Image: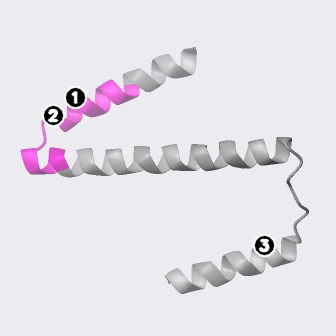
Amino acid sequence: MCYSFFMMKALELAITKASSLSEAAQEQLGRELLERIETLEQLRAEVALGLSELDAGRGEELDIGDVIRQAREEHAKKA
C-alpha cells in the first residue's frame, strides 16, 4: 500500500531527526508518542465495539440537539 510506504518513510525521518535531540528530549518524545499510540488503540477498540453493537441491532437513534448540548457541557467542564 502506498500510504503505508510513505508512513514508514515519515516515521523513519522523524526517528532520524529525533536521534539528534538530547536524551531527555528523546525520552519525552518517546513517552508522548507511546501515549498517542495507546490513545489511538483505545479509540479503535471503542469504534470496533460500537460497530459490533450496531451490527447486532443494538443501536439507538440519537437526538442531535442532545448530543450537541452534552458535548458543550463536557467541553465547558474541561475549560
Q: Which sits earlier in the primary sequence, circle 1 or circle 3?
A: 1
Q: Find the magenta span and give its range.
A: 10-27
Q: Is residue 3 magenta?
A: no
Which one is nearer the viewer's eye here, 55 or 3?
55
- Residue at 68% x, 46% y is 49
Amino acid residing under circle 3: Val
Q: Are marks 2 and 1 in contact (CB under 8 Å)?
A: yes
Tell me the element at label 1: helix
Tag 2 residue: 19
State how far apart marks 2 and 1 are (Cα).
5 Å
- Residue at 13% x, 42% y is 21
State how far apart marks 1 and 3 are (Cα).
43 Å
Amino acid residing under circle 1: Thr
Amino acid residing under circle 2: Ser
**How far across and down, in percent of the image, does residue 39 sit?**
46, 51
- Give the label, 3 or 2, closer to the camera: 3
Question: In this view, which residue lies farthest toward the left?
Answer: 23
Q: Is residue 29 left or right of residue 45?
A: left
Above-or-below relation of 16 to 33: above
The part of the image, by quadrant, that contains residue 72 is bottom right
Disc number at residue 67?
A: 3
Tag 1 residue: 16
Q: Is residue 24 magenta?
A: yes
Q: Which sits earlier in the primary sequence, circle 3 or circle 2?
A: 2
